[in-house]
Each structure stands twice: as structure tokens, then as C-alpha cells.
Image: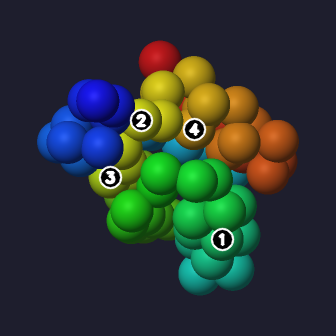
Amino acid sequence: MCMGLFSKPETHEFAISGMSCGGCERKITNALTSISGVKKVTASASDGKVTVVSKGVSKEVISTKIHDSGFTVNP
């Protein structure tokens, strides 16, 4: 049996540089929701944060997608 089907969703939060407007929020949200396993994305330019709820998606995959979208993930 595949245990991944029954795993709980994980929530990851990222501090982001370069996100300054609603267009930036949409760009990150659209990029991250294209990843299979991502359930919900909340991007806030005013807070400089992105919160991702996913199942079976590593922080590294999410971070890479954010970077590929033109933004910087801060430690």
C-alpha cells in the first residue's frame, strides 16, 4: 500500500525578496499551484511571505520553483 496517499498535508513558509505587488503574488501562486501535490498557496507581497500547503512536495522543489519565477527565497 502507498502510504503517501494517507500522509497529512505539510505547511511550509518562505520569506521572499522581490515580490512587490499583486501581480507578483499571482505569478508565484500560479507557478506553485502548477506543482502536483500543492494544495494551497498564500502569497503576501506586503509581508514578503509565501505559505504553501502540500502533500509529498519538498521545500527544495517549492524553493526552486519560486527562484525560477524570478524571486529570491531568504533563509
Mark nearest the camera among 4 and 2 is 2
Is 64 positioned to the left or the right of 47 in the image?
right
Query: Which residue bears the numbered disc 3?
Result: 53
Question: x and y percent of residue 67 in the render?
Answer: 74, 37
What amino acid type is highlighted by mark number 2? Gly
Task: Give whichever of 71, 10 is nearer the camera.
Answer: 10
Asked which secondary structure carries label 1, the reply is helix
In the image, 68: left or right of 9?
Answer: right
| Residue type highlighted by circle 4 | Ile
Q: Amino acid at mark 1?
A: Asn
Q: 6 or 12, which is in the foreground?
A: 6
Quarter in which the N terminus is drawn = top left
Label 4 packing within 10 angstroms: few (<14), some (14-19), many (20+)? many
Residue furthest to the bottom in view is 22
Most extreme residue toward the front, as rendered?
1
- Please report contact status of discs 4 and 1: CB closer than 8 Å, yes or no: no
First-in-chain label (1 vs 3)? 1
Circle 3 SS class: strand
Q: Residue at x 48, y 35 (%)?
A: 57
Q: Is residue 36 above or below residue 15?
A: below
Quarter of the figure with residue 21: bottom right
**Residue under the point 48% across and 27% down:** 58
Determine the CA span between mark 4 and mark 2.
11 Å
Decide: is 29 above or below 57. Answer: below
Q: CA gap, disc 4 to disc 3?
A: 11 Å
Local SS, label 2 = loop
Question: Residue 30, labelled with which disc?
Answer: 1
Q: Is residue 28 visible?
A: no
Circles 4 and 2, Cβ within 8 Å, touching? The answer is: no
Q: Which residue is mark 4?
A: 62
| Gap between marks 2 and 1 measured at Cα | 19 Å
